[in-house]
Image: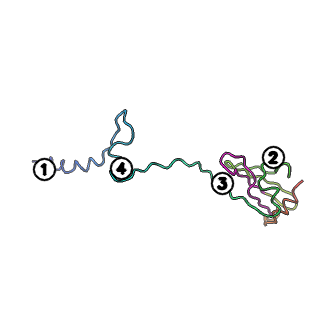
């Protein structure tokens, strides 16, 4: 046997490991070489996740008339929002007055539901220092 032929026979198994297996028309599933070996469980890819996470709902004294309310109810309480920021399925509404700035964050409680107020932040307009949320709610309510 000549040296070229011997080298080709030695390299043949290595080259076969690099080959791509193309499934034949009419066959389903992965080609036999791509299937899990016997005794090794085949894993199916995880079903796609919706990406929805239920929000944490803030609680606190003086916020019971705000938390859980939808956009329309908040507009009835505080009038037109100074700022409306949609973010995906969430919404941020902002009101401002001489005493404070109020940000209310609305998130859906379950996938596909209408967003409701789940979090409130309040600060002074002059220096952005945090102020009492319930006091700011009272100051900005109509």
Q: Which coloring applies here?
A: rainbow
- The main secondary structure of the magenta stretch is strand
Q: Secondary structure at mark 3?
A: loop
Q: Which residues are magenta?
A: 103-123
Q: Disc 4, disc 1: CB below 8 Å?
A: no
Picture coordinates of residue 51 (x, y %)?
59, 50
SS for callout 1: helix
Residue 135: where, in percent of width, then height? 85, 63
Quadrant hosting residue 24: top left
Say whether disc 2 or disc 1 marks the residue closer to the N-terminus.
1
Which residue ends up furthest to the right in the rendered image?
Answer: 142
Of label 2 and label 3, which has the lower sequence position? 3
Q: Is residue 114 magenta?
A: yes
Label 2 secondary element? helix
* Disc on res. 72: 2
Q: Residue at x 70, y 46 (%)?
A: 113
| Neighbours of disc 1 within 10 Å: few (<14), some (14-19), many (20+) | few
Q: CA distance from mark 4 to mark 1?
A: 37 Å
- In the rendered structure, find residue 36 and report the number of the disc placed on it: 4
| Residue named by callout 1 | 3
Instruction: Determine whether label 2 and label 1 are within 8 Å by CB.
Output: no
Foreground mark, 2 or 1? 2
């Amino acid at each position: 046997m000549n040296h070229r032929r011997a080298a080709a026979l030695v390299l043949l198994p290595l080259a076969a490991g690099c080959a791509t297996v193309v499934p034949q028309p009419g066959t389903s599933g992965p080609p036999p070489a791509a299937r899990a070996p016997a005794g090794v469980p085949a894993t199916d890819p995880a079903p796609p996740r919706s990406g929805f996470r239920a929000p944490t709902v803030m609680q606190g004294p003086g916020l019971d008339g705000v938390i859980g309310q939808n956009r329309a109810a908040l507009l009835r309480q505080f009038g037109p929002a100074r700022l409306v920021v949609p973010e995906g399925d969430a919404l941020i509404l902002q009101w401002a007055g001489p005493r404070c700035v109020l940000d209310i964050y609305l998130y859906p409680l379950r996938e596909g539901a209408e967003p409701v107020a789940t979090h409130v932040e309040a600060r002074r307009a002059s220096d952005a220092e945090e102020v009492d949320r319930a006091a700011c709610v009272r100051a900005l309510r109509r």
